[in-house]
Amino acid sequence: MITQFSAKIEVPVRLWEIKGGRIQGKRVEADRINSVTTNWIFMRNWVQRFL
C-alpha cells in the first residue's frame, strides 16, 4: 500500500534523504519539518491498524 499526501512544503532536493523520508541536517527548519512528517507517519500507521 502506498500513501501519498501533500504538505505544501517545498524542500530542496539536495537536502531530502530518500531512504529515511526526512530532511538532512540539524537546521531548525529541518527539525520542524522532520517532526511534522514523523507525526504524520505515526498517525497514518495508527489509523491503518483499524482499517
Image: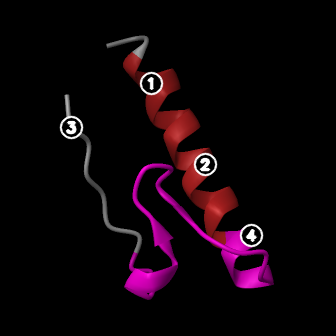
- Contact (Cβ within 8 Å) of mark 1 with mark 3: no
Observer able to see residue 35: yes
Whether residue 11 can be seen here: no
Q: Which residues are magenta?
A: 8-32
Q: Amino acid at mark 4?
A: Asp
| Crowding near the residue tagged with mark 4, few <14, some 14–19, many ≥20 C-alpha atoms within 10 Å | some
Sequence-first tag of 4 and 2: 4
Q: Is residue 31 magenta?
A: yes
Q: Give the label on residue 2, or none.
A: 3
Residue beneath disc 4:
31
Residue type, numbered disc 3: Ile
Which image quarter holds the N terminus? top left
Locate residue 51 relative to residue 41 in the image: left or right. left
Marks 3/2: CA–CA distance: 16 Å
Please give the name of the residue rendered at 70% of the width and 82% of the height, measured from the top-left corner.
Answer: 29
User: Percent x, y for residue 28?
Assistant: 80, 81
Of the numbered discs in the image, which one, if any, rests on residue 47?
1
Q: How many marks?
A: 4
Q: Is residue 14 placed above or below 3 in the rendered structure? A: below
Residue nearest the observer in this picture, 23 or 37: 23
Mark 3 / mark 2, whichever is N-terminal: 3
Quarter of the image where one finds residue 9: bottom left
Q: Name the N-terminal-most of marks 1 and 4.
A: 4
Q: Is residue 14 magenta?
A: yes
